[in-house]
Image: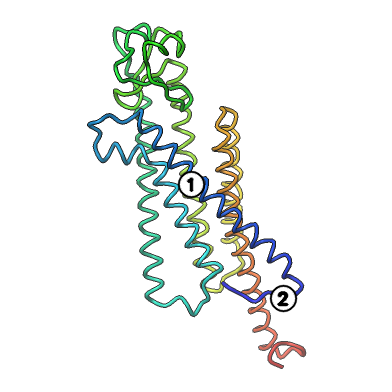
Amino acid sequence: MATVQSHSNWNMHKLQQTFKWVVYLLLFVNYCFYIEEDWSAATYTLGVDAGLAEWLSAFATTIDETAWFILLIMLELETYVLDEEQFTPRVTILLHTVRLICFTMIAYTIFAFGQYVIEVREIVPVENVESLCEIADRDLSYTYNLDYQEVTGTSCGTLSPDTNFYWVAGDEVVADAAGLRLERQLAWADFAEVMIWLVIIVAIEIVVRMQDRDISRGSVITILTRVKVLGYVLLLGLGVYWASLGHVLYLWDTILWVGGFVAIEMNLSEWRDELDDSANSTKKAALNVPGSDGL
């Protein structure tokens, strides 16, 4: 909750706020890059007859990022911006409604990523083809490590020397054996990442609800904190994995998102300190301790 900081803590508070808003700004810039990346990939993976389901699946990452960005804003409102008296019934209903929409979007993302994991497990060979040049100029694309290139008479001889190819993402994209294997690994990485984030957000939501009820300490909060820390470590590990494959943007994205939620953790910590101070003041007053507030 919003609090008036003591003079001794003002510099640290100002540093935390600067860190928070720089991270939020960078996350928004990064969000725009993901929209552009999904759009670029969609031009290769979607045909002219693609339906709504195919378009939604192609933009699963954008949908996921949108939901998380809105949830981050809501957590900032709940843990720092809004005072307790501002949580009117109307505001509470609005926050819960937006939260439900965001979790619905995340649920769809989990479904889309999970479905893709299943799809790439199926081995569907491109029959009667031993060279990409045999399918050149058929409006198909070759992919390896999330890089898409149109198979043309000019490019076909430079894309892959393999003689066996497989369909990826329906009948619009092909990959060789190494590309298919890597596609499966990346599909699992996407799925694992969104599941870890889901565990983290659920843990944060539980802590927020507990602190709303003036519960600032205890074994449950300790366990949830450890779960969140483990989740952040696993996410950074996945980011390093992406970077090792040349996708440095994904590591940068992970660092920014972890930074964004660290900002929320700082809000929770300040709120927790406020609850502790209030509880100590109440205890002193009840015990009639000299020097306590109100005496």
Up-down: is 12 above or below 295?
Answer: above
Q: Position of residue 12 (x, y in %)?
A: 72, 64
Residue positioned most to the front: 154
Residue ID at (56%, 68%): 80
Residue denoted by label 1: 31
Crowd class of label 1 (few under 14; some 14 to 19; many from 20; radius 10 Å) = some
Compare residues 19 and 103 and report the one nearer the observer. Answer: 19
Measure the C-alpha gap from mark 2 to mark 1. Answer: 36 Å
| Sequence-wise first label, 2 or 1 | 2
For mark 1, give the secondary structure: helix
Residue ID at (50%, 62%): 75
101 horizontally vs 147: left or right: left
Compare residues 92 and 284 and report the one nearer the observer. Answer: 92
Of marks 2 and 1, the one in the foreground: 1
Q: Position of residue 188 (x, y in %)?
A: 46, 33
Q: Which quarter of the image is occupied by the C terminus?
A: bottom right
Residue denoted by label 2: 6
Q: Position of residue 95 (x, y in %)?
A: 41, 66
100 horizontally vs 5: left or right: left
Residue ID at (73%, 70%): 9
Q: Position of residue 237 (x, y in %)?
A: 60, 37
Q: Amino acid at mark 2?
A: Ser
Task: Determine which of the numbered discs, if any, sits on residue 57 in the image.
Answer: none
70 horizontally vs 286: left or right: left
